[in-house]
Each structure stands twice: as C-alpha cells, then as structure tokens.
Amino acid sequence: MSSNPIRGIRRKKSSLTEVKIAVLGAPGVGKSALTVRFLTKRYIGEYDHQAETRYKHEVMVDSEPILFEILDTCPKNDEELPLNDVYNWADALVLVFAITDRRSFNYVRRVKQTMLDTFEMPVALVANKADMVHLRQVSTEEGTYINSEILAKDFECCFTEVAAAEQVGQIAEVFLEVCREVLSVRRKNKQSLLDRMLGGKTAVVKAYARGKSDSALPKD
Ligand SMILES: Nc1nc2c(ncn2[C@@H]2O[C@H](COP(=O)(O)OP(=O)(O)OP(=O)(O)O)[C@@H](O)[C@H]2O)c(=O)[nH]1
C-alpha cells in the first residue's frame, strides 16, 4: 500500500465517480475554513491567502465512494470575480458569504449575475460566521430571498446558514447535498440520452451534465 495518500487516490481515480466543486466568495468569508472543515472535520483559524488551492478527497456519499475535487478560490479583492475557466471546470458551486459582511453578500449576487445566462449547474448558497450574530449585517431573510427569488429561479439551490468555527455535520451536509444534486442530474441526463437513442423520446440534455474533462481545469 502506498504511504502517500494522494498517490493512493490517483491510482484509484479511474474507478471512482468524480465531482468537482468550486468554493466561491469574497475574501475572508471563510471559504478555506468551510472546505477544510469538510475535508478534515477540523477548524483552522488562519490560512495562507496567496493562491487558490485544489484538494482531492474520497468521501462515501450514500454508500457510493466519490472523489471530491474541491477548488478553494482566493480572490484578491471584492472586485475580482471568478473566471469562466472555473465555471467550465466545476460540476457544482458552493457560494459563500459572511453574515457579518454585507459586501460579501453583494459579491455572491454579482457572481450569480455574471454566470446566469452562460453556466448552469447545481449551487449551494452558504451564509457563514453564524456564530457572530452580534455583528450580523445580512439577515437570514435576505439569504432566503436571494435563494428563492434569484438563485432558485435558475438553479433551485438550497440555502444554509452555518459557522465553520463551530459546526461539522451541517457543513458536510452542504457539500454532500450539492454532490447528490450533481449525481442526480448526471443520472437524469444519462436516462434522457438513452430514451432518445432508444425511442426518439424528446428530452432536453442540459449542457452542465456533460462529464467535464481535466482539460477544463483552471490553470494553476
Ligand atoms: N467567527 C468565525 N470566524 C470564521 C468562521 N469561518 C472563518 N472564520 C475566520 O474568518 C477569517 C477568514 O477565513 P478564511 O477561511 O481564510 O476565509 P477565505 O474566504 O478562505 O479567505 P480568502 O482566502 O482570503 O478568500 C479567518 O480569520 C477565520 O478564522 C466562522 O464560522 N466564524
């Protein structure tokens, strides 16, 4: 057995279902804290904010082993929005804002607007730092509003308020749920394709259900 866990994962890669998730949000909202909580169950207060980080991790989702690839993005400032490369690469997005930072809520809204007409994929909307209610700038209602009125219109996305600093299970559930959505969309589209091949049933195959190849990876 290999002593290198990354090498171990690579060896098994071809037999595993892969799901690629990009974690997006303004600087400092807790993208790294959430990602590392999911991957290790640990909370680490401070991270290197110099560059985006890509993780690979095998997780059982409803008894099926899934290879999660998670891109923890790192915008330099509130104005820097994700490039199309990220959307082309990802199967799903976790959009994060902090309840203590209204500008981070607006950032998520801008991300949504820029990708709206071009990219379609499962999205989870996450309000982080729920432990800091005394510094709250964004109400749950607003999060729910963006969820139901804007995001859900195209993505039917779920909305969760969490604290990476305090929670483990709820954060894992965000990533697991968005993964389930990716798998469900893939299954539906596979079925649609089969229907079309077998009997000419009209079915719409959404672009985002295509398996995304490594060639769509964002540049390091
Ligand atoms: N109180 C509290 N602080 C948090 C929470 N999540 C993250 N933080 C803190 O917020 C700061 C930023 O967290 P990061 O995870 O580095 O945020 P990020 O979005 O990855 O930041 P960038 O890499 O700069 O984009 C750190 O000081 C964290 O300790 C939380 O749930 N509650």
Image (tube, rainbow, N blue to C red):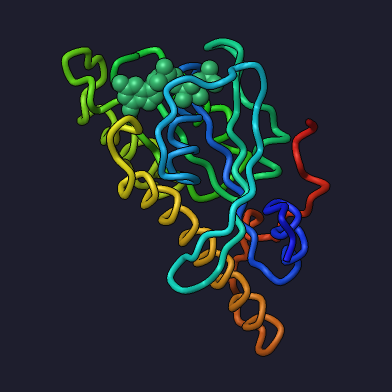
Q: Quadrant of ligand 1?
A: top left
Relative to 192, is 26 on the left or the right?
left
* Depth order, front residue of 19/51: 51
Q: In the figure, residue 74 lies in which quadrant?
A: top right
Q: In the figure, residue 67 lies in which quadrant?
A: bottom right
- Residue 203 point in image, percent of width and height: 59, 72
* Depth order, front residue of 112/16: 16
Q: Residue at x 64, y 60 (%)?
A: 18
- Vertical placement of 32 versus 106: above or below? below
- Residue 135 point in image, percent of width and height: 22, 12
Relative to 178, is 53 on the left or the right?
right
Give the residue furthest to the right. 215
Q: Residue at x 60, y 75 (%)?
A: 192
Total tally of numbered discs in the picture: 0
Q: Looking at the figure, which quarter contains the C terminus?
A: top right
Q: Residue at x 44, y 30 (%)?
A: 33
- Vertical placement of 3 versus 130: above or below? below
Q: Looking at the figure, which quarter contains the N terminus?
A: bottom right
Residue 36 visible (yes or no): yes
Residue 29 visible (yes or no): no
Give the residue furthest to the left. 134
- Residue 183 point in image, percent of width and height: 53, 65
- Residue 169 point in image, percent of width and height: 31, 49
Q: In the figure, residue 162 lies in which quadrant?
A: top left
Give the residue furthest to the bottom. 198
* Depth order, front residue of 175/91: 175
Q: Residue at x 16, y 14 (%)?
A: 134
* Depth order, front residue of 10/177: 10
- Vertical placement of 142 versus 213: above or below? above
